[in-house]
Amino acid sequence: MDFDQLETFLEVTRNLSFSRAAEKRFRTQPAISAQIRSIEEEVGCRLLDRSGGKVAITAAGKRFLRYVEEALEARRVALAAVAEIERVPSGEIVVAANEGTCLHLLPEVFADFKKQYPDVGITVKRSESREVLEAISDNSADFGVVAMPVKDKRLTTVVIHKDELVLITPPGHPLAGREEVSIVEVARYPLLIPKLGRTRDAIDEVLHDRQIKPNISMELDSSELMKRFVAVDVGVALIASSNVVSDVKAGLLCACRVNDVQIRRDMALVFRKDKALSRAALAFIDIAVKHKSVGEKERVPVS
């Protein structure tokens, strides 16, 4: 068997689907099936159970999977080690992050990185927080960017951005133009909140602790959607200040601090502790950390 067959086996186990694995590997489904059949013939047992119209990993397949992951990681480390001889970052890094982070936190980091290391490829996987951590755990991404705290002890975290939630309103709203408001004042107006995630959990906790029953107008799964709906006066929202700097400067939204609570939204670069980092990966960490100090100097204008 070869590394290409092992990559195919890994993709099938990740997706538990031959058709989805074929799409990911840019192959036909019969080609994927032939590779799996070849591996099973060589190891002498069935690794995947395809009965009942579903794909399941057999006991032998689960044990074999561990060695496949180790072999592919060893290959990656070996290639990276050889590339290090040139003393120049090369190859590719894969970063997983949610929509807001991709739009408002990472562009400057990527731009700076590409200026310094134009030969290193960057792939961005736009994912929700849970999916980001899954991508790091299964090694389909080198780095993830998620909100703190991260409780998984298998991961290393490097804080790259410190932020907090602010209240946003449309211009002309009764709270517009205020520098500060209380959480009780916020609760008097229709509230737009994230459907899921760390920010939603933090908002729910604050409201529960103060025994405040909010008037929830909408639950949305996108910070960009939330800003657009606030702009047309569907409600107000609590959102990371870094996500609305340009909107406030452009006069599309107004922002103010909530004076009696502070909901932090610090972001961290996360990666596996057992991962052998390439020179390109180490350079990316260095640039992301440097941008942290620059970003902390810019705060959302309070209007």
Image: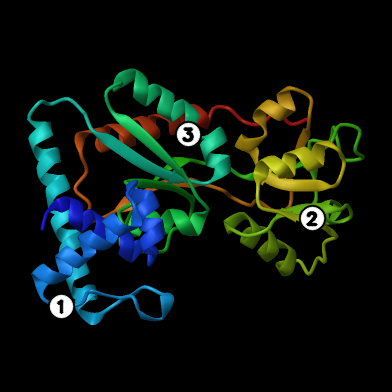
> Which residue is labeled 2 in the image?
218
The N terminus is located in which quarter? bottom left
Q: Residues within 10 Å of mark 2 (few under 14, many from 20)?
A: some
Tag 1 near tag 3, CB within 8 Å: no
Work out whether mark 2 precedes mark 1 in sequence or the reverse, and give the earlier one: 1
Q: Position of residue 168 (x, y in %)?
A: 76, 40
The label number, if any, that marks residue 265 in the structure image: none
Q: Position of residue 77 (x, y in %)?
A: 14, 46
Residue 68 in view in this figure: yes
Left or right: 71 with respect to 241? left
The label number, if any, that marks residue 106 in the structure image: 3
Left or right: 87 with respect to 293? left
Element type where label 3 sits in the image: loop
> Which residue is labeled 1 in the image?
45
Left or right: 149 with respect to 219? left
Q: Amino acid at mark 1?
A: Cys
Q: Position of residue 79 (x, y in %)?
A: 12, 40
Is residue 81 or residue 44 the one in the foreground?
A: 44
Q: Quadrant of residue 57?
A: bottom left
Work out whether mark 1 precedes mark 3 in sequence or the reverse, and give the earlier one: 1
Element type where label 2 sits in the image: strand
Work out whether mark 3 precedes mark 2 in sequence or the reverse, and give the earlier one: 3
The C terminus is located in which quarter? top right
Element type where label 1 sits in the image: loop
Residue at image location 82% in from the left, 66% down from the top: 213
Q: Residues within 10 Å of mark 3 (few under 14, many from 20)?
A: some
Q: CA distance from mark 3 to mark 2?
A: 28 Å
Q: CA distance from mark 2 to mark 1?
A: 53 Å
